[in-house]
Image (cartoon, rainbow, N blue to C red):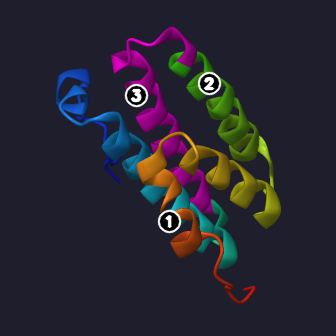
Amino acid sequence: MAQQHADLTEDRWREFDLDRQILMVANEMNRGLHLLEEQDGAGLRRSYERVLRLVDLTVAVQSKTTLRGELLRWRDLVAALYLEPAPSREAHRAAFRCLLQFTPEAARQIPLVLDRERPLA
């Protein structure tokens, strides 16, 4: 299976503003939330791999040192989820919420993706 985002370059990623970059990472976290709820462990791991790849690209193209540091700290949260044999829904949602708080535009998505009730799988 070809890895999604494998051919995405820093130059291409740099074309997106920070809001868009964070929202694209968030899209993968949202996909991961659905996979977690479906108990698709293999799919969830692939989702985390895509999240890590996109965060690495974001860190690489950002010039603000403090932002890069915060993104790397957040990346550690996802890396820990990736290493967990069975990540918890609560930990995933907490990391997802934290990501969405990186920019005002992304934060506007919180009520749409995290504050509504979803049935447990």
Three-letter amino acid code at the position of disc 3: Thr
- Which of 90 and 43 lies nearest the eye of the viewer? 90
Q: Which residue is mark 2?
A: 70
- The residue lying at 78 percent from left, 56 percent from top is 87
Provide the secondary structure element on which disc 1 rests: helix
Provide the secondary structure element on which disc 3 rests: helix
Quarter of the view holding residue 39: bottom right
Three-letter amino acid code at the position of disc 1: Arg
**Do labels 2 and 3 touch, CB within 8 Å?**
no
Q: Which residue is mark 1?
A: 31
Q: CA distance from mark 2 to mark 3?
A: 11 Å
In screen coordinates, is 30 left or right of 79? Answer: left
Residue 3: horizontal and vertical position, in percent? 35, 46
Of labels 3 and 1, earlier in sequence is 1
Q: CA distance from mark 3 to mark 1?
A: 19 Å
The quarter in which the N terminus is drawn is bottom left
Quarter of the view holding residue 60: top left
Three-letter amino acid code at the position of disc 2: Glu
Q: Is residue 103 above or below residue 1?
A: above
Of labels 2 and 3, earlier in sequence is 3
- The residue lying at 69 percent from left, 49 percent from top is 95
Magenta span: predominant SS is: helix
Provide the secondary structure element on which disc 2 rests: helix
The span shown in magenta is 42-66
The nearer-to-camera label among 2 and 3 is: 2
**Do labels 3 and 1 touch, CB within 8 Å?**
no
